Image (cartoon, grey):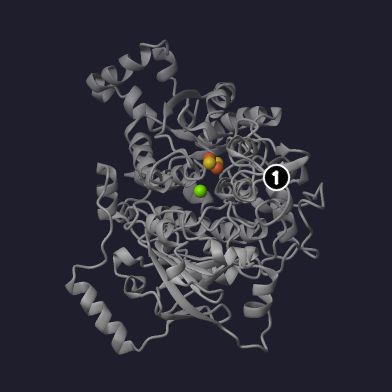
Amino acid sequence: MSPRRLRSQEWFNNPANADMTALYLERYLNFGLSREELQSGKPIIGIAQTGSDLSPCNRHHVVLAERIREGIRTAGGIAIEFPVHPIQETGKRPTAGLDRNLAYLGLVELLYGYPLDGVVLTIGCDKTTPAMLMAAATVNIPAIALSVGPMLNGWHKGERTGSGTIVWKARQMMAAGEIDYKGFIDLVASSAPSTGYCNTMGTATTMNSLAEALGMQLPGSAAIPAPYRERQQVAYETGKRIVGMVEEDLKPSDIMTRDAFLNAIVVNSAIGGSTNAPIHLAAIARHMGVELSLDDWQTYGHKIPLLVNLQPAGEYLGEDYHHAGGVPAVVNQLMGQGLIREDAMTVNGRTIGDNCRGREIEMPEVIRTFDNPLKPEAGFILLRGSLFDNAIVKTSVISAEFRERYLSNPADPEAFEGRAFVFDGPEDYHHRIDDPALDIGPNDILVMRGAGPIGYPGAAEVVNMRPPAYLIKQGVSVLPCIGDGRQSGTSGSPSILNASPEAAAGGNLAILRSGDRVRIDLRKGRADILIPDAEIAERQRALAAAGGYRYPASQTPWQEIQRRMVGQLGDGAILEPAAQFQRIAET
Ligand code: FES
Ligand code: MG
């Protein structure tokens, strides 16, 4: 029994309102819960279930929920499991990015409108993690996250095959005639040997690691592979702990502070985290009411070295990350340099400093020490200029040659300048990229627009574009790319992405024309169109007179509704009207 009167008792035990109490109670009795249980004052704990046959990455949560329940019951709580709108990153058309805010909205309604005192958030596949943390922030009842864990390592002919990353290699092998259609599918499928989420450092491993760095899941739990026995054991511990959190009234607002977000930014650089992380952390912070800007990524994240040797930036996969020590070993390295705000509170009631101090690296080839990193200065660079208000570059995947030429040598003021080739959405790119008439050269820049939250609802992961086939044959395997869309966390492309505002929201990418020259200065953080201001103004006038940048019509009701309310990637791409609702369980 909890020392406080819990919010669930407003539903289940309110003598002043016997009518409603009876109505609320009777239907929860019909599957076997008893009046004694529901009126006992024991915490009612929700298990927000993201697993289902539609969401294979998170499907193992259906099994883990049994252990969560046993933990809740052991600690004296009552478990109520309910479904959350499923999200499958690779299976959802046109993009799973569309569904993050939908799952958020749904979960807010459930947490606010039902008799729940605390909740276990079953996180995993890319967007499920931010969606659930965003909802927990808005409602602000005690909440703890449980990662479903990565898949086991994939293997093919004695080599590790990693989620997403293997697709790039398989494409080359098929193009070279080394494998056929069936061989292609077999090779890609070898990267998915078990239940769990992507085993590379894609958006899933990134966001699950950051949920731990934020303090929202038990220390050491993010990296445990889905099929391991420890995954079941930590599910039990998570269930037990949420009951204690309700008793202590330990809420998301006590944990997801500005210090916690700055810790997450630092950890993201050290793990080589996804370019989706700034979008999702911005969204969570805004729903939590915490100040966090893209400048914070530059200020606190850019100089941090890359420590974790996982594909796509490195060699290893999820099982190795866990055996090497996972998030606590990374945090301990960063703590040694004074880079972690050690007093930040976590779900276990202890600080992140107390949780991670002394957690040693167990496999030095997988997690490097701070003195022997894989790459220096591995965080994002923030760009501004006449092309957009903000965009980012992931420096941990920039080639050594490109880094040396445009970033590392302060004596050489060289900036990158080239002709832009502009594509309006992924379909336009696929139709035209190999057309020799475009005459794209080795010093040109590919631009993708119409791919932001409004232009391509949810924002497509399409900014990393391969050069035309005729250039690849000449040995040019990468061209700089700029775009108002996103990029898959499993891609190693050095793109300038998440450009805000997008073309469809009036950003200057909309007035760019193929053949215009563009100048990128990574050292100064600038990206500019090299045309006179008067010409820019004239093009803006002409575009406005023509009714603005055109994009395809919505295909579903939600696409249309979200387009009318969604903000830009630099601001988290949240539903803007939702930002005013904060900590609503207190209202
Ligand atoms: Fe679900 Fe990667 S597709 S985690
Ligand atoms: Mg993705």
Q: Which residue is mark 1?
A: 317
Give the x, y percent position of residue 167: 60, 46
Q: Quadrant of the C terminus?
A: top left
Give the x, y percent position of residue 559: 29, 47
Q: From where the camera sits, is residue 445 visible?
A: yes
Residue at figure coordinates x 50%, y 59% from the top left: 278
51 horizontally vs 25: left or right: right
Q: Which structural element holds mark 1?
A: loop
Residue at figure coordinates x 39%, y 13% from the top left: 35
> Which quadrant holds residue 117?
top left
Q: Amino acid at mark 1?
A: Leu
Residue at figure coordinates x 36%, y 11% from the top left: 30
How many numbered marks, from 0 up? 1
> Which quadrant holds residue 471?
bottom right
**Camera-side residue of 586 and 399:** 399
Q: Residues within 10 Å of mark 1 (few under 14, many from 20)?
A: many
Residue 562 vertical placement versus 248 (above, below): below
Q: From where the camera sits, is residue 451 visible?
A: no
134 horizontally vs 319: left or right: left
**Camera-side residue of 47 and 409:** 409
**Camera-side residue of 303 and 397:** 397
514 horizontally vs 225: left or right: left
Residue 170 vertical placement versus 401 (above, below): above
Question: Is disc 1's CB within 8 Å of ligand 1?
Answer: no
Give the x, y percent position of residue 255: 53, 50
